Image (cartoon, rainbow, N blue to C red):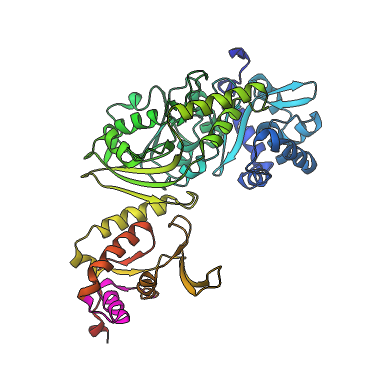
Amino acid sequence: MPDPGERPDPAAMEDPVIADLRVALREASFDDAFLARCEAIAPRMLDAVRLPIVHWWLRDHSSPAATLAQLWAYGDAVSEEALRRALPDGLVPALEGARLIRRGDDGWRGTMRLVPFEGLWVASDEMHGDDPVMGPGATTDELARAIPSRAGRVLDVGCGAGSLALVAAARGATEVVGVDLHPRAAAWSRFNAALAELPLELHTGDLTAPVKGRRFDLVISQPPFVVKPPQVRATTYLHGGAMGDELTMRLVSELPGVLAPDGEARLLFDSPTRADAPLWRRLQDAHGDDELRQLLFVTPGNSPDVQAIGYAASSHPALDGDYGREAQRYREHLRAQGIERCEHALVALRPGGPGLSVTIEQARLDGVDATVIADTWDAIAVASRPDERLLETVLGLPEGAWLVQEQASDGGELRLKLRLPPGRGGDEELSDAAAVLVDQLREPAPLAAVIRRYAAACRAEPEDVAAGVLDFVRQSLVSGRLAVVSTEPAPTEEAQG
Protein backbone atom coordinates (compact mmCIF):
# COMPACT_ATOMS: atom_id res chain seq x y z
CA MET A 1 0.00 0.00 0.00
CA PRO A 2 1.48 3.40 -0.97
CA ASP A 3 2.42 5.90 1.72
CA PRO A 4 -0.41 8.49 1.93
CA GLY A 5 2.28 11.16 1.95
CA GLU A 6 3.33 10.09 -1.54
CA ARG A 7 -0.14 10.35 -3.07
CA PRO A 8 -1.06 13.26 -5.34
CA ASP A 9 -2.13 16.33 -3.40
CA PRO A 10 -4.49 18.43 -5.55
CA ALA A 11 -5.14 20.73 -2.58
CA ALA A 12 -1.52 21.94 -2.87
CA MET A 13 -2.29 23.55 -6.25
CA GLU A 14 -3.19 27.22 -5.84
CA ASP A 15 -5.72 28.88 -8.13
CA PRO A 16 -3.17 30.85 -10.24
CA VAL A 17 -1.25 27.64 -10.94
CA ILE A 18 -4.48 25.82 -11.84
CA ALA A 19 -5.26 28.69 -14.23
CA ASP A 20 -1.86 28.18 -15.90
CA LEU A 21 -2.64 24.47 -16.24
CA ARG A 22 -5.99 25.29 -17.85
CA VAL A 23 -4.26 27.49 -20.42
CA ALA A 24 -1.68 24.79 -21.17
CA LEU A 25 -4.36 22.12 -21.68
CA ARG A 26 -6.34 24.39 -23.98
CA GLU A 27 -3.33 25.51 -26.02
CA ALA A 28 -2.23 21.89 -26.45
CA SER A 29 -5.68 20.98 -27.86
CA PHE A 30 -5.86 18.16 -25.36
CA ASP A 31 -9.60 17.77 -25.85
CA ASP A 32 -12.41 15.24 -26.28
CA ALA A 33 -11.68 14.78 -29.97
CA PHE A 34 -8.03 13.93 -29.34
CA LEU A 35 -8.89 11.48 -26.56
CA ALA A 36 -11.52 9.83 -28.77
CA ARG A 37 -8.82 9.22 -31.40
CA CYS A 38 -6.69 7.48 -28.78
CA GLU A 39 -9.63 5.46 -27.43
CA ALA A 40 -10.43 4.23 -30.95
CA ILE A 41 -7.24 2.11 -30.88
CA ALA A 42 -8.33 -1.47 -30.05
CA PRO A 43 -11.14 -0.16 -27.81
CA ARG A 44 -12.51 -3.48 -26.54
CA MET A 45 -9.21 -4.92 -25.36
CA LEU A 46 -7.77 -4.85 -21.85
CA ASP A 47 -5.22 -2.12 -21.11
CA ALA A 48 -2.34 -4.58 -20.82
CA VAL A 49 -3.02 -5.63 -24.41
CA ARG A 50 -3.81 -2.29 -26.06
CA LEU A 51 -1.65 0.27 -24.23
CA PRO A 52 1.65 -0.62 -25.95
CA ILE A 53 0.07 0.34 -29.28
CA VAL A 54 -1.53 3.48 -27.82
CA HIS A 55 1.89 4.45 -26.43
CA TRP A 56 3.49 3.83 -29.83
CA TRP A 57 0.90 5.98 -31.57
CA LEU A 58 1.30 8.84 -29.09
CA ARG A 59 5.10 8.79 -29.29
CA ASP A 60 4.86 8.83 -33.07
CA HIS A 61 2.39 11.72 -32.94
CA SER A 62 4.76 13.80 -30.74
CA SER A 63 2.45 16.81 -30.27
CA PRO A 64 1.79 18.61 -26.95
CA ALA A 65 -1.61 16.88 -26.79
CA ALA A 66 0.07 13.50 -27.28
CA THR A 67 2.56 14.28 -24.50
CA LEU A 68 -0.21 15.19 -22.07
CA ALA A 69 -2.12 12.03 -23.01
CA GLN A 70 1.00 9.94 -22.38
CA LEU A 71 1.58 11.67 -19.08
CA TRP A 72 -1.93 11.67 -17.59
CA ALA A 73 -4.26 9.44 -19.60
CA TYR A 74 -2.16 6.41 -20.56
CA GLY A 75 0.63 6.10 -17.99
CA ASP A 76 3.65 6.48 -20.27
CA ALA A 77 6.95 8.24 -19.59
CA VAL A 78 7.82 11.43 -21.50
CA SER A 79 11.15 13.12 -22.02
CA GLU A 80 12.21 16.40 -20.43
CA GLU A 81 12.12 18.04 -23.87
CA ALA A 82 8.57 16.84 -24.62
CA LEU A 83 7.36 17.92 -21.18
CA ARG A 84 8.77 21.44 -21.61
CA ARG A 85 7.07 21.74 -25.02
CA ALA A 86 3.70 20.79 -23.51
CA LEU A 87 3.87 22.71 -20.21
CA PRO A 88 5.33 26.13 -19.38
CA ASP A 89 8.48 26.07 -17.24
CA GLY A 90 6.83 27.67 -14.23
CA LEU A 91 4.12 25.02 -14.09
CA VAL A 92 6.40 22.00 -13.87
CA PRO A 93 7.77 22.70 -10.34
CA ALA A 94 4.25 23.33 -9.01
CA LEU A 95 2.97 20.06 -10.47
CA GLU A 96 5.97 18.22 -9.07
CA GLY A 97 5.51 19.83 -5.65
CA ALA A 98 1.87 18.68 -5.55
CA ARG A 99 3.04 15.19 -6.57
CA LEU A 100 0.99 15.32 -9.79
CA ILE A 101 4.08 14.47 -11.85
CA ARG A 102 7.37 12.85 -10.87
CA ARG A 103 10.75 12.42 -12.48
CA GLY A 104 12.09 8.87 -12.88
CA ASP A 105 14.97 7.09 -14.58
CA ASP A 106 12.93 6.78 -17.80
CA GLY A 107 11.65 10.37 -17.84
CA TRP A 108 8.62 12.17 -16.41
CA ARG A 109 5.44 10.34 -15.44
CA GLY A 110 2.06 11.52 -14.25
CA THR A 111 0.79 10.38 -10.86
CA MET A 112 -2.80 11.42 -11.48
CA ARG A 113 -5.28 10.72 -14.24
CA LEU A 114 -6.38 13.84 -16.13
CA VAL A 115 -8.65 13.48 -19.17
CA PRO A 116 -10.93 15.64 -21.30
CA PHE A 117 -14.60 15.00 -20.57
CA GLU A 118 -17.64 16.73 -22.08
CA GLY A 119 -15.68 19.88 -22.91
CA LEU A 120 -14.03 19.98 -19.47
CA TRP A 121 -10.95 18.37 -17.93
CA VAL A 122 -11.30 16.02 -14.97
CA ALA A 123 -8.38 14.96 -12.77
CA SER A 124 -8.49 12.02 -10.35
CA ASP A 125 -6.35 9.32 -8.82
CA GLU A 126 -4.78 6.74 -11.10
CA MET A 127 -7.38 3.99 -11.31
CA HIS A 128 -5.05 1.11 -10.40
CA GLY A 129 -3.92 2.52 -7.05
CA ASP A 130 -5.19 1.79 -3.56
CA ASP A 131 -8.86 2.83 -3.14
CA PRO A 132 -8.69 5.60 -5.76
CA VAL A 133 -11.09 8.49 -6.29
CA MET A 134 -12.73 7.90 -9.65
CA GLY A 135 -12.92 10.27 -12.59
CA PRO A 136 -14.85 9.53 -15.80
CA GLY A 137 -15.26 5.79 -16.39
CA ALA A 138 -16.11 3.69 -19.41
CA THR A 139 -19.84 4.46 -19.20
CA THR A 140 -19.89 7.84 -17.41
CA ASP A 141 -20.68 9.58 -20.69
CA GLU A 142 -24.01 7.68 -20.82
CA LEU A 143 -25.18 9.47 -17.68
CA ALA A 144 -23.62 12.76 -18.79
CA ARG A 145 -25.85 12.69 -21.88
CA ALA A 146 -28.86 12.33 -19.57
CA ILE A 147 -28.12 15.61 -17.74
CA PRO A 148 -30.38 18.37 -19.12
CA SER A 149 -29.51 22.03 -19.51
CA ARG A 150 -30.56 24.45 -16.76
CA ALA A 151 -31.46 21.65 -14.36
CA GLY A 152 -31.98 23.88 -11.31
CA ARG A 153 -30.74 22.43 -8.01
CA VAL A 154 -28.63 19.33 -8.69
CA LEU A 155 -27.30 16.68 -6.30
CA ASP A 156 -24.58 14.26 -7.44
CA VAL A 157 -24.45 11.29 -5.06
CA GLY A 158 -21.11 9.49 -5.15
CA CYS A 159 -19.58 12.39 -7.06
CA GLY A 160 -16.01 11.04 -7.04
CA ALA A 161 -13.80 13.62 -8.72
CA GLY A 162 -16.83 15.69 -9.74
CA SER A 163 -17.18 14.58 -13.37
CA LEU A 164 -20.99 14.66 -13.57
CA ALA A 165 -21.48 17.49 -11.08
CA LEU A 166 -19.28 19.70 -13.26
CA VAL A 167 -21.21 18.74 -16.40
CA ALA A 168 -24.42 19.85 -14.66
CA ALA A 169 -22.79 23.12 -13.60
CA ALA A 170 -21.43 23.74 -17.09
CA ARG A 171 -24.93 23.24 -18.51
CA GLY A 172 -26.38 26.00 -16.39
CA ALA A 173 -27.63 24.38 -13.19
CA THR A 174 -28.34 27.05 -10.59
CA GLU A 175 -26.84 25.04 -7.71
CA VAL A 176 -24.73 21.86 -7.76
CA VAL A 177 -23.92 19.78 -4.68
CA GLY A 178 -21.60 16.78 -4.68
CA VAL A 179 -21.49 14.11 -1.96
CA ASP A 180 -19.06 11.21 -1.65
CA LEU A 181 -18.09 8.78 1.08
CA HIS A 182 -14.41 8.84 0.06
CA PRO A 183 -12.52 11.40 2.18
CA ARG A 184 -10.32 12.48 -0.76
CA ALA A 185 -13.16 12.99 -3.25
CA ALA A 186 -13.82 16.57 -2.17
CA ALA A 187 -10.18 17.58 -2.77
CA TRP A 188 -10.24 16.29 -6.34
CA SER A 189 -13.67 17.84 -6.99
CA ARG A 190 -12.48 21.23 -5.72
CA PHE A 191 -9.40 21.01 -7.94
CA ASN A 192 -11.56 20.19 -10.97
CA ALA A 193 -14.07 22.92 -10.15
CA ALA A 194 -11.22 25.44 -10.07
CA LEU A 195 -9.85 24.04 -13.33
CA ALA A 196 -13.28 24.49 -14.95
CA GLU A 197 -14.00 27.83 -13.21
CA LEU A 198 -17.33 26.43 -12.00
CA PRO A 199 -18.94 26.52 -8.52
CA LEU A 200 -19.51 23.29 -6.57
CA GLU A 201 -20.70 22.67 -3.01
CA LEU A 202 -19.06 19.52 -1.63
CA HIS A 203 -19.70 17.23 1.33
CA THR A 204 -18.18 14.00 2.66
CA GLY A 205 -20.65 11.41 3.90
CA ASP A 206 -22.87 8.42 3.17
CA LEU A 207 -25.28 8.79 0.24
CA THR A 208 -27.78 11.61 0.95
CA ALA A 209 -27.07 11.96 4.70
CA PRO A 210 -25.02 15.20 4.36
CA VAL A 211 -27.95 16.98 2.63
CA LYS A 212 -30.78 15.69 4.83
CA GLY A 213 -33.71 18.12 4.79
CA ARG A 214 -32.80 19.69 1.43
CA ARG A 215 -34.66 19.16 -1.86
CA PHE A 216 -33.25 18.97 -5.38
CA ASP A 217 -34.67 19.27 -8.89
CA LEU A 218 -32.27 16.65 -10.25
CA VAL A 219 -30.39 13.86 -8.49
CA ILE A 220 -27.73 12.08 -10.53
CA SER A 221 -25.63 9.10 -9.55
CA GLN A 222 -23.52 6.32 -10.97
CA PRO A 223 -23.29 4.34 -7.73
CA PRO A 224 -20.77 1.53 -7.15
CA PHE A 225 -22.39 -1.60 -8.60
CA VAL A 226 -19.68 -4.27 -8.77
CA VAL A 227 -20.13 -7.49 -6.76
CA LYS A 228 -17.84 -7.79 -3.72
CA PRO A 229 -16.38 -11.28 -3.09
CA PRO A 230 -15.40 -11.86 0.57
CA GLN A 231 -11.71 -12.35 -0.30
CA VAL A 232 -11.38 -9.13 -2.36
CA ARG A 233 -10.36 -5.83 -0.76
CA ALA A 234 -13.19 -3.29 -0.92
CA THR A 235 -12.81 -0.30 -3.25
CA THR A 236 -15.09 2.66 -2.53
CA TYR A 237 -15.90 3.64 -6.12
CA LEU A 238 -16.29 0.05 -7.33
CA HIS A 239 -18.07 -2.32 -4.97
CA GLY A 240 -21.81 -2.13 -4.31
CA GLY A 241 -22.32 -5.21 -2.13
CA ALA A 242 -22.34 -8.99 -2.43
CA MET A 243 -24.89 -8.85 -5.28
CA GLY A 244 -23.55 -5.55 -6.61
CA ASP A 245 -26.73 -3.48 -6.44
CA GLU A 246 -27.32 -3.25 -2.67
CA LEU A 247 -25.88 0.28 -2.47
CA THR A 248 -27.97 1.35 -5.47
CA MET A 249 -31.17 0.12 -3.83
CA ARG A 250 -30.28 1.90 -0.59
CA LEU A 251 -29.82 5.13 -2.54
CA VAL A 252 -33.19 4.60 -4.25
CA SER A 253 -34.82 4.21 -0.83
CA GLU A 254 -33.51 7.68 0.13
CA LEU A 255 -34.61 9.48 -3.05
CA PRO A 256 -38.13 10.41 -1.87
CA GLY A 257 -36.50 12.41 0.93
CA VAL A 258 -34.34 14.59 -1.35
CA LEU A 259 -36.37 15.04 -4.55
CA ALA A 260 -38.39 18.21 -5.04
CA PRO A 261 -42.09 17.64 -5.91
CA ASP A 262 -41.32 18.12 -9.62
CA GLY A 263 -37.81 16.68 -9.38
CA GLU A 264 -36.25 13.67 -11.03
CA ALA A 265 -33.43 11.22 -10.32
CA ARG A 266 -31.34 9.70 -13.10
CA LEU A 267 -29.16 6.74 -12.15
CA LEU A 268 -26.81 4.54 -14.18
CA PHE A 269 -25.82 1.11 -12.89
CA ASP A 270 -25.56 -2.63 -13.51
CA SER A 271 -27.82 -5.10 -11.75
CA PRO A 272 -28.09 -8.91 -11.75
CA THR A 273 -31.02 -10.36 -13.68
CA ARG A 274 -33.38 -12.25 -11.37
CA ALA A 275 -36.39 -14.09 -12.78
CA ASP A 276 -38.23 -13.96 -9.46
CA ALA A 277 -37.53 -10.26 -8.85
CA PRO A 278 -37.23 -8.11 -12.00
CA LEU A 279 -35.36 -4.84 -11.72
CA TRP A 280 -38.49 -2.67 -11.86
CA ARG A 281 -39.96 -4.56 -8.91
CA ARG A 282 -36.76 -4.31 -6.84
CA LEU A 283 -36.72 -0.56 -7.43
CA GLN A 284 -40.34 -0.25 -6.34
CA ASP A 285 -39.63 -2.32 -3.25
CA ALA A 286 -36.72 0.01 -2.43
CA HIS A 287 -38.66 3.29 -2.57
CA GLY A 288 -42.23 2.10 -1.95
CA ASP A 289 -44.78 1.42 -4.69
CA ASP A 290 -46.52 4.78 -4.41
CA GLU A 291 -43.46 6.99 -3.89
CA LEU A 292 -41.85 7.27 -7.34
CA ARG A 293 -42.74 6.71 -10.99
CA GLN A 294 -40.12 4.70 -12.87
CA LEU A 295 -38.73 4.81 -16.41
CA LEU A 296 -36.08 2.19 -17.16
CA PHE A 297 -33.88 2.05 -20.27
CA VAL A 298 -32.28 -1.39 -20.09
CA THR A 299 -29.66 -3.14 -22.20
CA PRO A 300 -27.95 -6.52 -21.69
CA GLY A 301 -24.94 -6.33 -19.37
CA ASN A 302 -21.71 -8.31 -19.48
CA SER A 303 -21.67 -12.05 -18.91
CA PRO A 304 -20.26 -13.34 -15.59
CA ASP A 305 -17.07 -14.43 -17.37
CA VAL A 306 -16.49 -10.97 -18.84
CA GLN A 307 -17.34 -9.33 -15.51
CA ALA A 308 -14.80 -11.45 -13.64
CA ILE A 309 -12.10 -10.63 -16.20
CA GLY A 310 -12.84 -6.89 -16.20
CA TYR A 311 -13.14 -6.45 -12.44
CA ALA A 312 -9.91 -8.35 -11.72
CA ALA A 313 -8.06 -6.46 -14.46
CA SER A 314 -9.07 -3.12 -12.92
CA SER A 315 -7.04 -4.03 -9.81
CA HIS A 316 -4.27 -5.96 -11.58
CA PRO A 317 -3.66 -4.27 -14.95
CA ALA A 318 -0.43 -6.20 -15.58
CA LEU A 319 -2.50 -9.41 -15.78
CA ASP A 320 -0.08 -11.22 -13.47
CA GLY A 321 -0.73 -14.18 -11.21
CA ASP A 322 -2.65 -12.03 -8.74
CA TYR A 323 -4.97 -11.07 -11.59
CA GLY A 324 -5.65 -14.72 -12.37
CA ARG A 325 -6.46 -15.58 -8.78
CA GLU A 326 -8.72 -12.55 -8.35
CA ALA A 327 -10.56 -13.25 -11.62
CA GLN A 328 -11.34 -16.74 -10.33
CA ARG A 329 -12.54 -15.32 -7.00
CA TYR A 330 -14.93 -13.00 -8.82
CA ARG A 331 -16.21 -15.79 -11.06
CA GLU A 332 -16.74 -18.16 -8.14
CA HIS A 333 -18.55 -15.44 -6.21
CA LEU A 334 -20.84 -14.67 -9.17
CA ARG A 335 -21.74 -18.35 -9.39
CA ALA A 336 -22.29 -18.61 -5.63
CA GLN A 337 -24.70 -15.66 -5.82
CA GLY A 338 -26.58 -17.28 -8.71
CA ILE A 339 -25.72 -14.43 -11.08
CA GLU A 340 -25.70 -15.67 -14.67
CA ARG A 341 -26.89 -12.51 -16.45
CA CYS A 342 -26.83 -8.78 -15.74
CA GLU A 343 -28.65 -5.71 -16.97
CA HIS A 344 -27.12 -2.31 -17.67
CA ALA A 345 -29.72 0.32 -16.85
CA LEU A 346 -30.32 4.05 -17.05
CA VAL A 347 -33.21 4.71 -14.68
CA ALA A 348 -35.28 7.88 -14.30
CA LEU A 349 -37.51 8.28 -11.23
CA ARG A 350 -40.07 10.99 -10.48
CA PRO A 351 -42.23 11.65 -7.42
CA GLY A 352 -45.87 10.65 -7.73
CA GLY A 353 -47.68 7.43 -8.44
CA PRO A 354 -49.37 5.21 -8.15
CA GLY A 355 -46.93 2.46 -9.06
CA LEU A 356 -46.15 3.50 -12.64
CA SER A 357 -43.17 1.63 -14.11
CA VAL A 358 -42.14 1.45 -17.76
CA THR A 359 -39.20 -0.62 -19.03
CA ILE A 360 -37.79 0.00 -22.51
CA GLU A 361 -35.27 -2.50 -23.80
CA GLN A 362 -32.44 -1.09 -25.91
CA ALA A 363 -29.57 -2.64 -27.81
CA ARG A 364 -27.34 0.18 -26.53
CA LEU A 365 -27.73 3.24 -24.31
CA ASP A 366 -25.59 5.63 -26.33
CA GLY A 367 -28.63 7.24 -27.98
CA VAL A 368 -30.57 7.79 -24.76
CA ASP A 369 -30.03 11.42 -23.80
CA ALA A 370 -31.88 14.08 -21.82
CA THR A 371 -34.17 14.83 -24.76
CA VAL A 372 -35.10 11.18 -25.27
CA ILE A 373 -35.88 10.79 -21.56
CA ALA A 374 -38.06 13.92 -21.49
CA ASP A 375 -39.84 12.91 -24.70
CA THR A 376 -40.50 9.44 -23.30
CA TRP A 377 -42.07 10.86 -20.14
CA ASP A 378 -44.28 13.04 -22.36
CA ALA A 379 -45.18 10.02 -24.50
CA ILE A 380 -46.14 8.05 -21.38
CA ALA A 381 -48.46 10.89 -20.37
CA VAL A 382 -50.12 10.92 -23.79
CA ALA A 383 -50.38 7.13 -23.91
CA SER A 384 -52.12 7.22 -20.52
CA ARG A 385 -54.95 9.42 -21.84
CA PRO A 386 -58.45 8.01 -22.19
CA ASP A 387 -59.38 6.73 -25.65
CA GLU A 388 -61.42 9.77 -26.68
CA ARG A 389 -58.52 12.16 -26.04
CA LEU A 390 -55.94 9.88 -27.62
CA LEU A 391 -58.08 9.68 -30.78
CA GLU A 392 -57.71 13.47 -31.18
CA THR A 393 -53.91 13.34 -30.94
CA VAL A 394 -51.90 13.95 -34.11
CA LEU A 395 -49.27 11.23 -34.51
CA GLY A 396 -46.37 10.60 -36.86
CA LEU A 397 -43.06 8.84 -37.14
CA PRO A 398 -40.19 10.12 -34.94
CA GLU A 399 -37.85 12.66 -36.49
CA GLY A 400 -35.06 10.75 -38.21
CA ALA A 401 -37.12 7.57 -38.65
CA TRP A 402 -37.92 6.10 -42.03
CA LEU A 403 -39.60 3.08 -43.57
CA VAL A 404 -37.58 0.85 -45.88
CA GLN A 405 -38.34 -2.32 -47.77
CA GLU A 406 -35.77 -5.07 -47.42
CA GLN A 407 -35.63 -8.55 -48.87
CA ALA A 408 -35.11 -11.39 -46.43
CA SER A 409 -31.68 -13.03 -46.46
CA ASP A 410 -33.26 -16.26 -47.70
CA GLY A 411 -34.52 -14.48 -50.79
CA GLY A 412 -38.09 -14.43 -49.53
CA GLU A 413 -40.64 -11.69 -49.92
CA LEU A 414 -39.94 -8.04 -49.20
CA ARG A 415 -40.57 -6.91 -45.62
CA LEU A 416 -41.12 -3.41 -44.31
CA LYS A 417 -38.63 -2.31 -41.66
CA LEU A 418 -38.85 0.77 -39.48
CA ARG A 419 -35.45 2.35 -38.91
CA LEU A 420 -35.42 4.44 -35.75
CA PRO A 421 -32.92 7.09 -34.61
CA PRO A 422 -30.55 6.34 -31.70
CA GLY A 423 -32.25 6.04 -28.34
CA ARG A 424 -35.64 5.21 -29.86
CA GLY A 425 -35.43 1.42 -29.71
CA GLY A 426 -33.40 0.48 -32.78
CA ASP A 427 -34.52 -0.96 -36.10
CA GLU A 428 -37.67 -3.05 -36.08
CA GLU A 429 -39.12 -5.44 -38.63
CA LEU A 430 -42.86 -4.89 -38.80
CA SER A 431 -45.54 -7.53 -39.04
CA ASP A 432 -47.87 -7.23 -42.02
CA ALA A 433 -50.58 -5.62 -39.89
CA ALA A 434 -48.14 -3.22 -38.19
CA ALA A 435 -46.62 -2.32 -41.56
CA VAL A 436 -50.02 -1.33 -42.94
CA LEU A 437 -50.75 0.76 -39.85
CA VAL A 438 -47.37 2.51 -39.70
CA ASP A 439 -47.60 3.20 -43.43
CA GLN A 440 -50.65 5.36 -42.68
CA LEU A 441 -48.37 7.61 -40.59
CA ARG A 442 -45.85 8.56 -43.26
CA GLU A 443 -47.65 11.89 -42.99
CA PRO A 444 -48.82 12.99 -39.51
CA ALA A 445 -52.53 12.56 -38.87
CA PRO A 446 -55.05 12.41 -36.00
CA LEU A 447 -55.32 8.90 -34.63
CA ALA A 448 -59.04 8.75 -35.41
CA ALA A 449 -58.26 9.38 -39.09
CA VAL A 450 -55.47 6.80 -39.01
CA ILE A 451 -57.90 4.19 -37.70
CA ARG A 452 -60.36 4.92 -40.50
CA ARG A 453 -57.65 4.65 -43.16
CA TYR A 454 -56.24 1.50 -41.61
CA ALA A 455 -59.70 -0.09 -41.48
CA ALA A 456 -60.25 0.75 -45.15
CA ALA A 457 -56.88 -0.76 -46.08
CA CYS A 458 -57.82 -3.93 -44.18
CA ARG A 459 -61.39 -3.94 -45.57
CA ALA A 460 -62.76 -3.79 -42.04
CA GLU A 461 -64.96 -1.49 -40.01
CA PRO A 462 -63.18 1.13 -37.84
CA GLU A 463 -64.90 -0.09 -34.68
CA ASP A 464 -63.57 -3.60 -35.33
CA VAL A 465 -59.91 -2.50 -35.39
CA ALA A 466 -59.97 0.46 -32.99
CA ALA A 467 -59.10 -1.45 -29.80
CA GLY A 468 -56.11 -3.19 -31.38
CA VAL A 469 -54.84 0.05 -32.93
CA LEU A 470 -55.16 1.95 -29.65
CA ASP A 471 -53.16 -0.74 -27.85
CA PHE A 472 -50.47 -0.73 -30.57
CA VAL A 473 -50.26 3.07 -30.51
CA ARG A 474 -49.90 3.23 -26.73
CA GLN A 475 -47.05 0.72 -26.81
CA SER A 476 -45.44 2.46 -29.80
CA LEU A 477 -45.52 5.91 -28.20
CA VAL A 478 -43.72 4.65 -25.11
CA SER A 479 -41.15 2.61 -27.05
CA GLY A 480 -40.37 5.48 -29.44
CA ARG A 481 -41.80 3.79 -32.52
CA LEU A 482 -44.31 6.66 -32.92
CA ALA A 483 -44.17 10.32 -31.91
CA VAL A 484 -46.69 12.95 -30.87
CA VAL A 485 -46.92 15.79 -33.38
CA SER A 486 -49.71 17.70 -31.64
CA THR A 487 -52.03 17.10 -28.71
CA GLU A 488 -54.50 19.74 -29.89
CA PRO A 489 -57.67 18.45 -31.58
CA ALA A 490 -57.08 18.45 -35.34
CA PRO A 491 -59.63 19.52 -37.96
CA THR A 492 -61.73 16.66 -39.25
CA GLU A 493 -61.05 15.28 -42.71
CA GLU A 494 -64.42 16.66 -43.82
CA ALA A 495 -63.52 20.16 -42.58
CA GLN A 496 -60.15 19.96 -44.29
CA GLY A 497 -61.88 19.00 -47.54
Observer-nearest of 366 and 227? 227
Q: Quadrant of residue 113?
A: top right
- Residue at image position (24%, 78%) is 491
Place of residue 14 in the rendered image (x, y in percent of width and height, measured from the top left): 58, 24
Q: Which residues are magenta?
A: 443-462
Q: Looking at the image, is 445 positioned above or below residue 85?
A: below
- Residue at image position (61%, 25%) is 128
Quadrant location, the C terminus = bottom left
Quadrant location, the N terminus = top right
- Residue at image position (37%, 75%) is 436
Residue 133 can be seen in this image: no
Q: Looking at the image, is 142 positioned above or below residue 424?
A: above
In this rendering, position of residue 353 left or right of residue 117: left
Place of residue 42 in the rendered image (x, y in percent of width and height, measured from the top left): 67, 44
Observer-nearest of 372 and 231? 231
Asked if the stretch drawn in magenta spans residue 366, the answer is no
Place of residue 409 in the rendered image (x, y in percent of width and height, measured from the top left): 56, 67
Asked if the stretch drawn in magenta spans residue 446, the answer is yes
In this rendering, position of residue 410 left or right of residue 64: left
Q: Residue furthest bottom?
A: 497
Q: Quadrant of residue 34?
A: top right
Place of residue 405 in the rendered image (x, y in percent of width and height, measured from the top left): 50, 73
Q: Looking at the image, is 29 positioned above or below residue 90?
A: below
* Magenta residues, dominant SS class: helix
